[in-house]
Amino acid sequence: MNVRILVTGLGTVSAAGLSLHDNIVVLDSGRRALSACPSFLDTVLQVPVGEVRADNAVLKERLGLPEGRTVTRTALLAALAASEAVRDAGLDRGMLSGGRTGLIVGTSVGGMDLSEEFYGEFRKDGGGDTDLIRMHDCGATTSFVADYLGMTGFRTTVSTACSSSGNAIMLGARMIRAGLLDTVVAGGADALSRFTVNGFNSLRILSSSPCRPFDVSRDGLNLGEGAGFIVLRKDSPGSVGGHEPYCILTGWSNTDEAFHQTGSSASGEGAFSAMSEAMSAAGLEPDDIDYVNAHGTATPGNDLSEGTAIGRLFGKSAVFGSFKGYIGHTLAASEGIEAAFCAISVRDGVLWPSAGFSEEDPEIGMSPMCALRRGCRLRHVVSNSFGFGGNNSSLVFSGL
Amino acid sequence: MIIRAAYRICPSEGQEPDYRETIPDANTRRRMSRIVKMGVASALGCLDMVPGTEPEAVITATALGCLADTEKFLIEIGDRKETMLNPSPFIYSTFNTVAGQIALVRGIRAYNMTYVNGGCSFNDAMRDAALCIAEGMDNILVVAYDENTPTAETVMRRIGREYIGDAVSVAFLLSGDLPGTHRIPDSFICGAGIDPEDMSGNIREAERLYRFYMEDDGK
């Protein structure tokens, strides 16, 4: 019998707020937390973004860090969400510093928010404040969070673009199941940076208006930033204390579509196989799934591919939606944040409407769920995150 | 866990294949930066040593990723004032580009993962490979790669950190224990004592395992 993996703590930071509670208030209200253009990020690109509404000084204050300390925004966001998840799970100092608790962080930009500041100066005259570059590498974000939380056990950092935190969570579950760890804090973080905003702009997949996942008129995504972490705990007779579990992580899968570096196939092969394999890992059939949290970025390509795969796997009456219309696409943080939302969905029986949808795309032939639902019994929820390099991840969260 | 095949590319030591043979498609080759070409070619070279092998997992490890393309895109952003940018350096600067390209070139639809944990990246990738094997998978491809650039060289010197001399990529095809073969010592899998802040650790550990493989009679 495989060990059960409980989800016992949640933490999120996004454009919708600096805590899970604030994020849920925004989802409940149906308000989209996107801004018309960045206010903290220094860029000429005036495109809608899901920007965390706090500058680095405010984030440092929340974390109790001296304002003069140089820390990347990615690491600040990560520390904020991870510490919320750890508190929520009731992990005490002893558990955090013990060798049976791990930290797994997914990020796609790492410390780029400060590196690009450094590079501007460096290129001008070979100067630049080297403190800005010390946290460039992705592992520095993880080390910062571990040190901040007093975690001394296993820690690692993964980067598979927009599916990074999905894969971080999956790795945590695998390590618990293999008996290597008992508790894992897993998720991801990404700050907005000129690098990524320009990158996605050069790919011509940014929308100039609030994004419209699965809508016939969708024309691109809005970038967001934030962090999301969940605490996974081995369910064993001996494990006591901590938070009452939200749900169980029962299935996971990571497959590669091997189709295109940045695009996905119209038939949705990659999404189909990731979802199918995650379900089969959980021992479930399509009929067992009550909701699919789609990656749903609102690019024409992703939503066609993913919608087609959802239709093929679950039928045209599948209940699905996307959170991107609320907070934008937070890249490596997206599954960390959305896994926390899914955990609340499963525990409380709530489904939030997919924001930004008005007209069905005949090519997809189905519509996301657009009404707030409470009191539903959600047995199992599939949550998707797909990234560059054809990297597709699906997780399955199940009721207790 | 044992090593079925290993393949190293290190141009500064003259260890470099003819990329036209390993990556025959000229368009694919042209779009790839030097380190992406090296990473992909080392993987394919390694796979070709055991013909007919379809890996069940592709795991890459890098400390700093595709530095040249990252810098190229930063220069574009500055010089072109954030307008009309060529997306290629952005696309190929992504940390999982090598893993994605290996999957794409060979049509490998399996588990695909990239570790970016500084100096510990390679050991973390090896731990994942061991986990994959324990879960019942076989033929795990692990590729460690890193490149240096004049900028990285200067910056590393200024902050007083060690880094690799020049680009290196090392690929391993790994499998579960077989009778009569030598197991990989645990020190390559757990990596205790390596400082994640030591960016040269990724390549140093991969090369240490490569030497172990080359010198080991029981392979």
Image: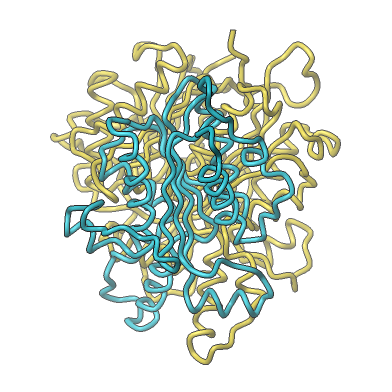
Chain colours: A yellow, B cyan
Task: Provide residue B103's location: percent of width, then percent of height.
Answer: 31, 41
Q: Is residue B18 above or below residue A189?
A: below
Q: Nearer the viewer, residue A353 or B7?
A: B7
Marks counted in the figure total 0
Task: Provide residue A88's location: percent of width, then percent of height.
Answer: 72, 35
- Which residue is at 47% across, 26% downward? A252
Task: Provide residue B217's location: percent of width, then percent of height.
Answer: 54, 37
Q: Residue furthest front?
A: B217
Q: Quadrant of the N terminus of chain B?
A: top right
Q: Quadrant of residue A84?
A: top right
Q: Quadrant of residue B63?
A: bottom right
In the rendered image, is residue A122 in sight?
A: yes
- Indicate left or right for A126 with A299 as reference: right
Q: Residue furthest bottom?
A: A125
Task: Provide residue A37's location: percent of width, then percent of height.
Answer: 41, 66
- Which residue is at 62% across, 26% downward? A7
Q: Residue furthest left?
A: A362
Q: Quadrant of residue A97?
A: top right
In the rendered image, is residue A31 in sight?
A: no
Q: Nearer the viewer, residue A393 or A363?
A: A393
Q: Residue furthest right?
A: A94
- Which residue is at 39% across, 29% downward? B56
Q: Nearer the viewer, residue A104 or A24?
A: A104
Q: Is residue B15 above or below residue A374?
A: below
Q: Is residue B92 above or below residue B79?
A: above
